[in-house]
Amino acid sequence: MSLLSERVLNMSTSATLAMAAKARELKAEGKDIIGLSLGEPDFNTPDFIKEAAKQAIDDNFNSYTPVDGYVELKEAIITKFKRDNNLNYELPQIVVSTGAKQALANVAAVILNEGDEVILPCPYWVSYSDIVKVNQGIPVEVKTSIENDFKLTPEQLEAAITPKTKMIWYSSPCNPSGSVYSKEELRGLADVLQKYPNIIVVSDEIYEHINFVGGHASMAQFDDMYNRTVTVNGVSKAFAMTGWRIGYIGAPAEIARACNKMQGQVTSGANCIAQRAVITALNASPSRVKYMIDEFEVRRELILRLLNDIDGFKTNKPEGAFYVFPDISYYFGKTIKGVTIKNATDFSLFLLEQANVATVTGEAFGNPNCIRISYAASQEQITEAIKRIKVVVS
């Protein structure tokens, strides 16, 4: 009999972190692994943000922070929401957390009861499903297609809703597909949700600024959706601050108060130095980090060109984030170099072991026909990685 709870025994290990760990093990053994598995910008945090952190240390910010974040940071978040998203929030609607992942976990914990259903358009970020399940909810996966750029349609949403539906979670730009919902597409989903006023929307917008189509749309921008939408964001991706661990929500005040209460019993307030640095990051113009977005766009074109030169890789053109999500089901049932490929997990492990390239199986994202490849790596690494893949599958 295990000493551990059924909750943790039934929980999956994060596939992205597991693949990264395996890649590190192989590197430690002396293998030349190219890691295209983690969703982490390969840029340094901008200097103006680091200087703000140094100043905070010199100014002796070293005490416990308010559970929901410094007032000055919450004010910066409010300014950012208004400036970038045309969303109007007030201080009681903002909660700062230790990363957007904690923000998502808070939301699930304060809204879900046992048996509540959460609609997850597939593919979805790896942790959505387990966050829902650990809070006794039921993930309802809705398959999308590469032909439709992996986007949920109003018809699919309508078909997935049941009397038990409590929430819908999605990300835009999407991790892992890079899909970006337009304002018109979100309006189509919102029109369906008007028939079901008790369903809460969780809009994960962490990749907001890594967007190649020139505009970002938020579900909360619609007056008839504002009071039932939780907007989740953070600084990990656009500002190359993954390790600083600051995320936040803008939400209906009742939900924000509940998240504050939950967080107060779990971790309390986020890191003081990181919060002071994020005030500077968010108060700055998004143009300060455009050089990163421009480089990601160049890499997107590079990796798509290289992948499209390999038989069996079916791609679409992602509009944001820094991932491609090719359909590789062409290889299922085939034997390559003595290895029979049964599914995306087999294929991802095959690439790691035979090509020394780390990717992530699409099964972890709710799509068993694809793999996720991150292009948050140098152009040289991308070129070499795809060259290796082409050699081992040819």
Image (spheres, rainbow, N blue to C red):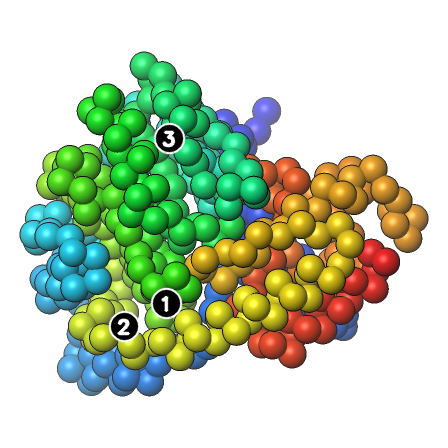
Disc 2 from disc 1: Cα separation? 9 Å
**Towards the viewer: 20 or 226:** 226
Q: Dot 2: few (<14), some (14–19), or many (≥20) neighbours within 10 Å?
A: some
The amino acid on which the numbered mark 1 sits, given as a three-letter code, is Ala
Q: Which residue is mark 1?
A: 238
Looking at the image, residue 251 sits to the left or right of residue 332; the answer is left
Disc 2 from disc 3: Cα separation? 32 Å
Disc 3 from disc 1: Cα separation? 29 Å
Looking at the image, is mark 2 or mark 1 nearer the viewer? 2
Q: Residue furthest top?
A: 163
**N-terminal-most mark, 2 or 3:** 3
Secondary-structure class at tag 1? loop
Q: Quadrant of the C terminus?
A: bottom right
**Is there a contact, CB below 8 Å, between mark 2 and mark 1?**
yes
228 relative to 70, above or below:
above
The residue drawn where x is 73% and y is 62% is 309
Q: Is residue 169 visible?
A: yes
Q: Dot 1: few (<14), some (14–19), or many (≥20) neighbours within 10 Å?
A: many
Q: Dot 3: few (<14), some (14–19), or many (≥20) neighbours within 10 Å?
A: some
Q: Which residue is mark 3?
A: 154
Looking at the image, residue 254 sits to the left or right of residue 125; the answer is left
Residue 199, position in %: x, y? 26, 27
Q: Which residue is mark 2?
A: 286
**N-terminal-most mark, 3 or 1:** 3
Looking at the image, is mark 2 or mark 3 nearer the viewer? 3
Residue 90, position in %: x, y? 7, 52
The amino acid on which the numbered mark 2 sits, given as a three-letter code, is Pro
Secondary-structure class at tag 3? helix
The residue drawn where x is 65% and y is 66% is 305
25 relative to 45, above or below:
above
The residue drawn where x is 33% and y is 85% is 47
